[in-house]
Amino acid sequence: MTNPTPTAPERYNAKDAEPRWQAAWAQAKIFETPNDDSRPKYYVLEMFPYPSGRIHMGHVRNYAMGDVVARYKRARGFNVLHPMGWDAFGLPAENAAMERRVNPRDWTYANIATMRGQLQSMGLSLDWSREIATCDPAYYKHQQRMFLDFLEKGLVTRRTAKVNWDPVDHTVLANEQVIDGRGWRSGALVESRELTQWFFKITDFAEDLLGALDGLERWPEKVRLMQKNWIGKSEGLEVRFALTRSVGAHDAVKVYTTRPDTLFGAKFLAIAADHPLAAALSADRPELQTFIEACRRIGTAQEAIDTAEKLGFDTGLTVRHPLDPAWELPVYVANFVLMEYGTGAVFGCPAHDQRDLDFANKYGLGNTPVVCPEDQDPSAFVVTDTAYDGDGRLINSRFLDGMTTGEAFEAVANRLKQEVLAGSPVAARKVQFRLRDWGVSRQRYWGCPIPIIHCDACGPVPVPVADLPVKLPEEVSFDQPGNPLERDHAWRNVPCPRCGQAARRETDTMDTFVDSSWYFARFTAPWLQDAPTDRRAVDHWLAVDQYIGGIEHAILHLLYARFFTRAMRETGWSGVAEPFAGLFTQGMVVHETYKDEAGAWVPPAEIRFESEEGTRRAFHVKTGSPVAIGAIEKMSKSKKNVVDPDDIIASYGADTARWFMLSDSPPERDVIWTEEGVQGAARFVQRVWRLVNAAAQAGGDGAADLGLRKAAHRALAGVGDDVERLRFNRCVAQVYTLANALDDALRGTASREAATEAAGILVQLIAPMMPHLAEECWQALGRSGLVAQASWPQVEAALLVEDEITLPVQINGKKRADVTVPRDADAKAVEAATLALEAVQKVLEGKAPRKVIVVPGRIVNLVV
RNA sequence: GCGGGCGUGGCGAAACGGUAGACGCAGCGGACUCAAAAUCCGCCGUAGCAAUACGUGUCGGUUCGAAUCCGACCGCCCGCACCA
């Protein structure tokens, strides 16, 4: 008996169903997470958005992934924390204020309202009761409190420093925010300025931040490596070179080197233009002053650095070689020496450092090779244009000759440790980091005010905790460039909290990366009014089990957050060091670009396609004129290759958008948004709906049941495994496979019992990805309650194993036949069955194979 | 320059060292329809009527067996970049 052709069910109507189920979830409050719950905790977090105006497809992809994990873990019996908030301070609000004469706060909150609505239309299983916005005084109040705590603990300092100045945004940028010499947001060439700034002492944690990377096993190797390189640890020696005549208070120059083994190859000493000794020398030497100015002008602009010639100024000074007082070396001021790294001075070893070689060749200083590669003849080894910076054996180096570079390093370090110059050892071992302290002062209005009052008598004085928050003034005007806080005298002029005299508020606000450095901790108890965190809550929920976001934060946000969490531990606000136990960096959403005949970008919505002889051609919808199909690139307003999530949700529904975002590419790779792909996803939504309804009416004799049940449980096991590993594209493929199996079974002989069981599993498998459709199907199957609250089905292990297995048979590594044997057949039995095969006998021609390899459950290979 | 990653059909991609191309998209042929959409059936790496041969950037190696491991090269992508 076969199943009757099912009466066609109505089409699934996402527009009707999605808001209905969103309301049902909200009403049941099933995504609101209690802190006191006996179930094991699971904290899944996606990087919170900046409220720029509207969500984009990148958000859809990011939040769809997080939602799959959240819903899956909930079904698996975890108490899941899945919150959402707004990274709400930042420059675009001020730019909008300037362009449109709106208040940054009003602009930001209007955007939040819009974007909250958009996220809600996606059907995300978020706990909206924990929503936070970083621009809310109820949030930044605690950030100010922690700033003061950090200050007291010595984790914050104020000092003048050469900083990166963004001339377009009129603000300072941290090193991490300068990309290719340009501001990360404005794209302007960054200038160098000397300013007094507040710094977080991230370098205090350099060793710990580096060492702990090894423990972050569920982070991408790539991100760990990037952070490792950014922290940039090196181990070397700090060596003092005695000046042959003192200059003011200077009687020696301190040099940092990782290659003390090459010390006998030294030809000169070079100091940075900003080195105090250079300043002392330049006092009565105008030509040196001119040279120093020229070095500063090259400054930090990257293009200049790339092409800049090595330039030096011979000071006429000399220093004594630390291993031979009779040996004198000239001292140069050189444009390639950085004041910010090491001691701001280097010894030049031209033979083994390319920069030193370029410099020495230019100024005729010569070179003496002191390290010979193992495969070269020491007596013939010379260096001309290319320095040798590898390992080898020491030559031309007196007592070091014949040693390896490693041995020579140790020998020099030990010798110089014993030598004394002006009462202290000539050299000491020194660990040096590339990482600099985090400058957090920003000369902007729309940020968290730094809670400090400057008093002429008392200096910078912390605002008393009882006076927090230091709120931003409500009324601001942006009719002049610069920071409006500086012009707001009513806000700015306050009495000193210590002496009561007239004083002024700090007008700099904090870098917005501070705001995002602890929001994940705030989510654990966002209702607290008197403290940033509740220790029980924060220690319970942290670390975040799965954090998902873009790779662009590999260094900036992810390093700052790791620092901040450590600083919070130092000040008692957290008991953990690492904020994110598992990290996943998802790829971008990319799209084809289109240009009309005039060379203007055309948005996808205005394109119509035609297929001619297999080639796809694009035309403008309105004008009908041809449009050139360009490169596939990240969706961006400038290239107009943007698809608005609202439009997609309106025409296809959120489930279709989510399904497509998860289906095509591996999640860490870029996904290409295509109209065909979305339509494919939409077709599958309808197909699931038809299948489930057909299953509910099935009435076959059950001949197909076993196969169907096996397919269902295979998919169940596979999808579970793939969600755990965030391989969403494979989850999708497994669901398709099950849908195909259910389709086949329904066509013939599946019983209603087996069909509805398989359909039920199908529905639960899609529920994390297409939650609204799943609810509608769940109801159609007559199941009670919400699928969002249903437990993940149990895999019946017996259904995953076959009684008989078919193994491929290879002869000399080429597949020639198949052999079917019982599942538990031993190697001998498999061999016998294989040799009995007709195809095998034909090849063997009566001879015995030279070797038989049986890999149980896998393959048989005969060597003849 | 330094560090890392990736090269598989027309496309997105699968593949514990074990049958390369699962699954989807596009395409082609057919059914249903007056027609279209939707849906359904079939085909779909290359060559060949077929048996079969050849195929995972190129060349070599290890192995009974390599997309996968090793070496060299080519190409693309990402990060850092005068860090001593």
Image (cartoon, helix red, strand yellow):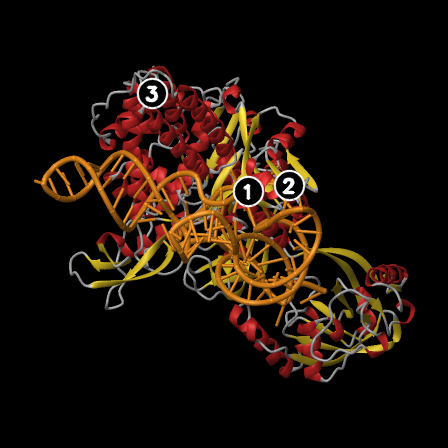
Residue depicted at 84% across the width and 63% down the height: A404
Q: Which amino acid is tagged 2?
A: Leu
Secondary structure state at the residue bearing disc 3:
loop
State the mark number for residue A816. Answer: 1
Q: Which residue is mark 2?
A: A862
Extreme residue toward the front, this view: A846
Whether the residues at callouts 3 and 1 have beta carbons within 8 Å, the answer is no
In the rendered image, the quadrant that contains the C terminus of chain A is top right
Q: Which amino acid is tagged 1?
A: Arg
User: Which label sits in the foreground, 2 or 3?
Assistant: 2
Whether the residues at callouts 2 and 3 have beta carbons within 8 Å, the answer is no
Tag 3 and tag 1 share a subunit: yes
Q: Residues within 10 Å of mark 2 (few under 14, many from 20)?
A: many
In the rendered image, the quadrant that contains the N terminus of chain A is top left
Looking at the rendering, which quadrant does residue A825 occupy?
A: top right
Residue closer to the observer: A638 or A320: A638
Q: Residues within 10 Å of mark 1 (few under 14, many from 20)?
A: some
Residue depicted at 21% across the width and 54% down the height: A608
Q: Which residue is mark 3?
A: A749
Secondary structure state at the residue bearing disc 2:
strand
